[in-house]
């Protein structure tokens, strides 16, 4: 079986690439390395069943041919991270909407199995304790750039559902809830690597807003396991599945836990949203998934606890800082 992974040199994509290669599959990666990195694929760079194509999915000439050659297409290429979204909303919209449109158009032409990555951001300002895939969505106003990412990914979902209904595309949407682990960068505002980097440098951990906002963090290995379980299941076609954990923690408490696990006395620096992002920035105060749908589908549940997740990120960043030595 041959897989095509767009964004395969990114954080999640590189882990998925390694997993598939380890089980004997062939993988083609298309990535422009704008947010991903060849370094993420260094462990498998010389693998005989891996092909890496450096190009942008918006304009590259290889995409159509590679979709046609694949048995399964996993679309992970996207503009990600709140900081990137706020500071470059045009890139966010164009990449996420038109890139996905191209991938799905080519996948529908040849009837390829297709998964696209969406995000918990689509739930917007919902006040529910746990978000369910069938919930109504509450997005903020178009004058606030923060919501452009949610809207772009939601339009991706509508695209897939339209192709499924109209052209019988065997497609599935997965909504990630704060996937974290080794190789994730804090460059675009990802909170855990940003906290760990600060803790290891003994500089104050920057906590945005009040710090009372809660999130759930799922290890990338658990996420890859979920994707691998979903891929072969026809019962997943034309449906949406949350992937995440139910354990919630406030960002302030996360900062404290990171310092504890890193044995750091860095302390915390509170940063107003208008300083971190832009005036009028709106945040989601609580974001936690209801994962009953995926559990019913394939029995998946996350297995790795938050403390282990933090330890893995600490080990990765410490090793990177030491030139690859733990």
Image (cartoon, grey):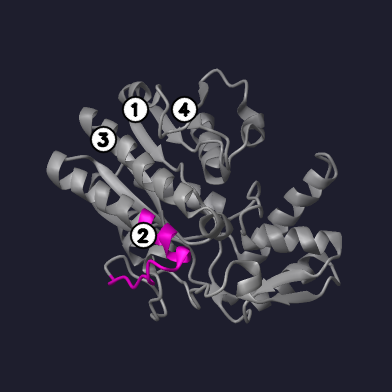
- Circle 1: element type: helix
Image location (x, y in percent) of residue 198: 78, 62
Disc number placed over residue 105 in the picture, else none: 3
Magenta region includes residue 95: no
Disc number placed over residue 151 in the picture, else none: 2
Q: How far apart are labels 2 and 3 at the CA level?
A: 20 Å
Magenta region includes residue 145: yes
Which residue is at 72% across, 64% downward?
Answer: 195
Q: Which residues are magenta?
A: 135-152
Which residue is at 65% across, 50% downward?
Answer: 185
- Circle 4: element type: strand
Residue that numbered label 1 is attached to:
67
Q: How far apart are labels 4 and 2 at the CA level?
A: 30 Å
Q: How far apart are labels 4 and 1 at the CA level?
A: 12 Å
Mark closer to the chain start, 1 or 2:
1
Image location (x, y in percent) of residue 141: 37, 71
- Asked if one can make out residue 198 in the rendered structure from this viewpoint, the answer is yes
Q: How far apart are labels 1 and 2 at the CA level?
A: 26 Å
């Amino acid at each position: 079986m041959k897989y095509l992974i767009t964004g395969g040199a990114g954080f999640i994509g590189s882990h998925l690439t390694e997993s598939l290669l380890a089980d004997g599959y062939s993988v083609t990666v298309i990535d422009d390395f704008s947010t991903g990195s060849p370094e993420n694929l260094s462990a498998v760079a010389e693998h005989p069943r891996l092909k890496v194509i450096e190009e942008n999915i918006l304009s590259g000439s290889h995409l159509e041919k590679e979709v046609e050659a694949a048995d399964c297409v996993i679309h992970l290429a996207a503009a990600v991270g709140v900081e990137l979204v706020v500071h470059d909303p045009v890139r966010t919209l164009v990449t996420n909407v038109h890139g996905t449109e191209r991938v799905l158009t080519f996948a529908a032409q040849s009837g390829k199995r297709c998964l696209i990555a969406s995000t918990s951001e689509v739930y917007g300002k919902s006040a529910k304790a746990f978000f369910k895939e069938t919930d109504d969505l509450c997005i903020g106003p178009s004058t606030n750039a923060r919501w452009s990412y949610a809207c772009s990914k939601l339009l991706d979902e509508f695209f897939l559902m339209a192709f499924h209904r109209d052209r019988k595309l065997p497609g599935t949407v997965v909504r990630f809830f704060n996937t974290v682990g080794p190789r994730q960068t804090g460059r675009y505002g990802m909170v855990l690597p940003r906290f760990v980097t600060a803790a290891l440098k003994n500089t104050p951990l920057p906590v945005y807003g009040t710090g009372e906002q809660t999130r759930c963090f799922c290890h990338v290995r658990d996420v890859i396991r979920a994707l691998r379980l979903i891929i072969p299941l026809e019962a997943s076609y034309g449906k949406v599945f949350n992937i995440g954990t139910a354990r919630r923690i406030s960002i302030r408490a996360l900062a404290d836990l990171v310092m504890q696990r890193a044995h750091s006395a860095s302390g915390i620096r509170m940063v107003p949203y208008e300083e971190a992002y832009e005036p009028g920035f709106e945040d989601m105060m609580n974001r936690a998934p209801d994962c009953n749908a995926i559990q019913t589908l394939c029995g998946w549940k996350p297995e790795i606890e938050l403390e282990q997740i933090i330890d893995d990120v600490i080990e990765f960043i410490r090793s990177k800082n030491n030139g690859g030595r733990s």
